[in-house]
Every structure is written in C-alpha cells, then in structure tokens.
Image (tube, helix red, strand yellow):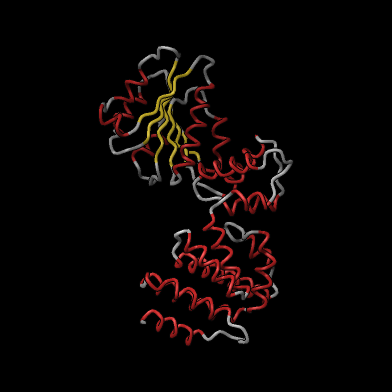
Amino acid sequence: MVAHKTGSFQRALKSLGRDCRAALVYGPDAGLVAERASALAETFASKDKDAIEFVRLDERDLADDPARIEVELRTVPMFAKRKVVRVTANPRLDVAALKALLDDLFDGALIIEAGALRPDSALRKLFEGHPTAVAMASYVDEGSVLDVIDAELGKAGLKIDSDTRAYLTTRLGADQALSRAEVAKLALFSAGNERVSAEDIDEIVGDSAEIAVENFVYEVSGGDAKEAVRQLARLDATGTEPSIALAALGRHFALLHRIATAQAAGASIDQVLRSQRPRPNFKRENALIADSRRLGAQRLLEAIPMIHDAVKWSRLNSDLNRALAEHLVLALTRRGESRVSSRSSRERTERVAAD
C-alpha cells in the first residue's frame, strides 16, 4: 500500500483506510516501535464498534506452531467480533506464508513489530508493496520526544516553559518508552503544582551518575579542581568508570572550542548552541560561554588531545584510571598558567600509566 516515514506517523494513523488490514512498524528503538504498534492496535480496534480481542505472539509461539498467526486471525473470538494480532518479528517469521495470508481475506488485523530493516528486506518490501498493508519507519527525533513530554504533562494538567522543556529533553534517553516513563514519573512528582520547574527535573529525572558527569565536566572547565575530583569520587561510588567521565569531558571541551572559535570570528554563539543535539542544559549556557571566553580557542585546542590521551590510557590501564583522571583534572585546572602544554602533559600522563 504505502511506506510512511517517521515524521508522518500521526498523519498516517488518521489516513489508514478500512481496507488496510496489516501493518509493519520497524526501527532501531524498540520502545518507540512498541508505542507505535500500540497506537496502531487501537486505531485498528476503533474501526469496529464491537469488542476486539488483542493477541500477542512471539518467537516461542511460532516455534510451537508455525501457522499460529493464520490460526489466530481466522479463529473467531469467543467474546469479541474480531482480533488484532501483534507479532514480534523473529527468524521463525515466514515471509512467504505472510504474503499468502495477506493475499487472502481475514477479519482481524495484523501488526508486525521489527527492528531496523534494510530497504531490500523481504518483510519490508512485502508490506510496502501490498495493497492491504502499510509499512511505517520509526526513528526517534527531537520532535517525537517533545510530543511525549507535551502528552504526559498535558494529561497531568501541568505546564512547562520552553527552556525547561528543552532542558528536560537533555535528561531523557534514546528509548522512547523509557522516556515516557521518566516524564510520567516527573508528572507524578510535580502533582499539585501548576508547572514543572528545572529543579523538579533535577530532583526526579535521570540518575546520579549522569548528573555527576555533567557536574564534573563543568567543574573542570570552570577551574575548580577540588570539586571536580569530588565529582569523580561520586561517580566511583555509583560504579561509573572514570573513562566515561573523561570521554564526556572531551565532548565538553570540543564544544567549548567551537564556541570560542565562533566568538573570535564574531559569529553567533546561539547558533552554535542550537546546532547541538540535544542542546546543552540552558542553565549551563552562561557557564559555557564564560568558560570558553576565559580559556580561549588556542588553550582549548591544546587541551583536547590531552583528554583523548587520558581516555586511551585509562581504558588500557583500568587499575589506574582514577589516578589518570585526577592527574588530568589537575593539569587542566592548574592556576597561574596562561597556556596548557599539551606535549608535557601527555608525557606525564604516559608516565603515570607506565608506573
């Protein structure tokens, strides 16, 4: 029938005709695929005012009975008029048998949930080309995450301003189902208030390790060695490897360098920030700009290879990764020096690793 791209999902739901009896939802985000499959199931069910039975099948069901999909679709439910059958794609799924089933008539509706599929996938080509089926690609984008935030907070009667909303997106992960759960938790936490605040988000969304990593990178760029080392200890307590914090530090200094370069060229700093996905925490933007101005493009450029070397050595020497991280912090936050010596610091890092 048709292949719908990710941005047109809601529009595709409304445009499904009564002759559409099967759908394929695919993409790398299992949570998003499951959410959209559920929305499709409800859409198929809404076509009929009578009771609908929902059936879920997976690889174990097809292992016991390879014809289980057809049996379910052709069996009249005891307490409903029709069935909506949802199937998780797996190696036991027979595409040829599916084609024969789609070519024939059945009263129910079929939904196949799959991971990322290549354009030449037999399953994808079947649903894209069949007159009674539809294929829907599902990929997470910033818009879909914002839709989740608006939907969950809207149900709770909560308001959120644009800056706080943008900040919340930085705290949410890639899995859409988990993101929805986090926003629902935030809504429950904020119940009784008129709007959600950044403080509410800090209190309830995300884990302590994620917050400690963010604190760590800003303390380093801000020049506070003592507080940066304290955040490393906090990460150690959560079981987070220092190499993770150092990798985040590398990304942070790369962003600072882009901002400093934009400042020196007279370009728009806001444009640099808006180009980031996700955009940096709006509460930290003033610190980003101040740190980039204080450190300068040249000093930041010299610091980046130091950080990359520390990441490499910490991964090769797991017993010394905490010491390597602390040594890097001291090198980057050392007071009284106008420039960081990349070569000498890299040599010291190698000596720490060798010892």
Q: Is residue 168 left or right of residue 112?
A: right
Residue that lies at the very extreme toward the top in this rendered image: 78
Q: Quadrant of the C terminus?
A: bottom left
Q: Nearer the viewer, residue 113 or 13?
A: 113
Q: Nearer the viewer, residue 209 or 100?
A: 209
What residue sits 69% from the left and 68% below the top? 268
Q: How many marks?
A: 0
Is the residue 303 above or below the residue 124 in the image? below
x, y (%) of residue 115?
40, 43
Is the residue 51 above or below the residue 111 in the image? above
x, y (%) of residue 75?
35, 16
Is the residue 142 above or below the residue 181 in the image? below
What residue sits 47% from the left and 38% below the top? 136
Q: Quadrant of the N terminus?
A: top left
Q: Is residue 63 left or right of residue 142?
A: left
In which quadrant of the rendered view does residue 299 lie?
bottom right
Is the residue 188 above or below the residue 259 in the image? above
Q: Nearer the viewer, residue 150 or 327?
A: 327
What residue sits 52% from the left and 28% below the top? 16
x, y (%) of residue 7?
55, 43
x, y (%) of residue 240?
45, 61
